[in-house]
Image: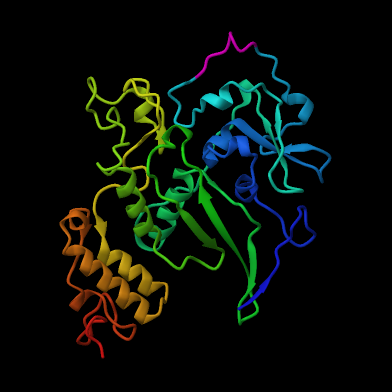
Amino acid sequence: MKKYSYPLEFPDPLFHLSLLGTYYFRNANLLHLRIEQFNRYLLLSDKIDNDVYRGCGIEPEEDDDVEASSDRFVETDHRHYDAFMEGQPPGKTYASRWKGVDTAKRRGHSRLGVAKTQHLEPIGRTRERFYQQKLVLGLPWYADAAPQLVETTAGAKQVAWVLKWKRPSTLAAYDLPDICLEMSTAGSSFSYEERCHHFENIFSSSTLNIACRCCDGEIGQGACQACIYAVGFHICVESGVREHRWRRNTLFGGLLDVQRTIFNLHRRMFPTDVIRSKAQENLHCASEPAVSEHCVVVSYACCVCTVSYCFRTKKRKPRSILTQA
């Protein structure tokens, strides 16, 4: 594949950034915001369209909110509530970290945004997209460099992003992992379901001990209103801890269906050797008690086969990818 340098400045006559792409280059003071929090408190100014603010359907001068902060109701138990943004005045602007990318502006108190995402079910062909959406919405991602423009052998041009996640400031003393996510318009080279399951186990592990006890119903009569609707890392008042705590099942809930993840790789036409190594890796993990309790490992001898054999029908004797010569 041939690589091209992506524009170092925006706007560019050939390429443009969507709301999500602009979000990746947001101001350093906003790195802790998830995309849905960013959309709730901020809107974008498009310098090309005479400073008309996108995403709200109103002109800039109509967005001057003069409500007194002492008179307004603050919904602290909202799932996208952020204490820092609640303290910022309406109309305040935040320059992007990348030259030419749209500036973000604090919305008016009475005009906070509502995130609209596609409703996906974790079944069939939408299963991977469901977990991709879970991963993108569940953690605050950002980009340090412009995406790479790659041209395939067929001549199609694809955009590849390398994203990092912003650790909560109150958990600086914890040994949280460095997570790097590579996303491309051509599709991923890994299973989003497996990746969500892996990150969920890390944040919910007893080793880190950062899972919210209130969310788990271990405090009082059950989860508080803020914890009922919480997403990812949040601060729970009921727990009495002024550090961020993880909301279990934000990325993944239940057991990992290894059979389904392997089959999804097969359906996405991954090379047979890659599928075989992934199957062997999961079989090895099944022998470890710390891992097997989170996974459902099936018999690959009759379920994961070469591409010449139908996964569902049994018209021919299956050849296991683990034993194929």
Q: Is residue 69 magenta?
A: yes
Tell me if I can see residue 96 in this picture: yes
- Residue 286, above or below 196: below
Q: Which residues are magenta?
A: 68-74
Placement of the C terminus among the 4 image quadrants: bottom left
Tell which of 293 and 210 is nearer to you: 210
Q: Position of residue 202 (x, y in %)?
A: 32, 48
Q: Residue furthest bottom?
A: 325
Placement of the N terminus among the 4 image quadrants: bottom right
- Residue 78, above or below 209: above
Which of the 4 image quarters holds residue 185?
Answer: bottom right
Q: Position of residue 124 (x, y in %)?
A: 36, 62
Which color scheme does this rendered protein use? rainbow
Secondary structure mostly seen in the magenta stretch = loop
Q: Position of residue 163 (x, y in %)?
A: 54, 54
Tell me if I can see residue 252 in this picture: no
Q: Position of residue 191 (x, y in %)?
A: 39, 63
- Residue 199, above or below 85: below
Which of the 4 image quarters holds residue 14?
Answer: bottom right
Tell which of 90 and 122 is nearer to you: 90
Q: Is residue 231 magenta?
A: no
